[in-house]
Image (spheres, rainbow, N blue to C red):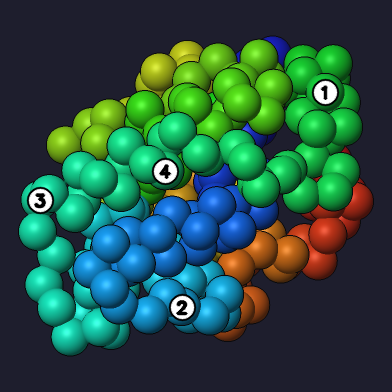
Amino acid sequence: MPDQAPRCALFDLDGTLVDSAPDIHAALDRLMARRRLPGFERAEVVGMIGDGVRVLLERAHAARGITLDEASFDHFMTDYEANAAVLTQPFAGIPELLSALQASGWRLAVCTNKPEAAARVLLSGLGLDRHFSALGGGDSFPMRKPDPGHLRATLAAAGAAPDQAVMIGDHANDMLAARGAGVRAIFAGWGYGPQSMAGGAPIALDVAGLRSLLG
């Protein structure tokens, strides 16, 4: 990366910056309860995360033998946004990492398949929003991860170029989008996705390891 250009770290949100599964799980179980259906085990919910809310809800409804309707989608979004930061916490070391990167001159952005409004509510509720110069949500642009256009659009919003950037995420979608956009990638090994999703990218086992890989 050119020394004179600002380095840019793009972060996935769920499973990378924050452990959001508890609140997603709680909202999903509340939605199932409205239909008088059983809830889910945490591992089931974690396996549904990564492709956006609609896909998560489609998977959850299919697991209960029913079809997602717009009323259920809207109810989930309203409920989840109101309770997005109740149980959710940043992963250990993330707030300190973000502060250290900013102090070192890094530009930071979030590139997530979570809808933009929900992502902003969550980041604000956890006090992390101040670190980021741009946020690309799953509905911010016509495309989303693994489409590399999602990363490119988020980078443009952050005022950075692909050769200045690194994508950090815990899902194959993050790695595929980075590869397609010509962006360096690091896999967040502490997150929700199995390490087999790294696809050859270096794996940071914890946040300290990520800091070392970022240099």
Q: Quadrant of residue 173?
A: bottom left
User: Which-is-in-front pick, marks 2 and 1?
Assistant: 2
Front residue of this view, candidates 88 and 209: 88
Q: Earlier in the sequence, mark 2 or mark 4?
A: 2
User: Which-is-in-front pick, marks 3 and 1?
Assistant: 3
Residue 74: x percent and y percent? 20, 43
Residue 165: x percent and y percent? 58, 35
User: Which-is-in-front pick, marks 1 and 4?
Assistant: 4
- The label shown at residue 40 is 2
Q: Amino acid at mark 3?
A: Glu
Name the residue that disc number 4 marks: 80
- The label shown at residue 70 is 3
Are the residues flagged by discs 2 and 4 in contact, CB closer than 8 Å? no
**CA–CA distance in space, label 3 to label 4:** 15 Å
Secondary structure beneath dot 3 equals: helix
- The label shown at residue 99 is 1
**CA–CA distance in space, label 2 to label 1:** 36 Å
**CA–CA distance in space, label 1 to label 4:** 28 Å
**CA–CA distance in space, label 3 to label 1:** 40 Å
Secondary structure beneath dot 2 equals: loop
Q: Amino acid at mark 4?
A: Tyr
Q: Earlier in the sequence, mark 2 or mark 1?
A: 2
Q: Tell me the quarter of the image containing the N terminus.
A: top right
Residue 45: x percent and y percent? 47, 71
Secondary structure beneath dot 1 equals: helix
Q: Quadrant of residue 3?
A: top right
Residue drawn at (27%, 30%) of the image:
140
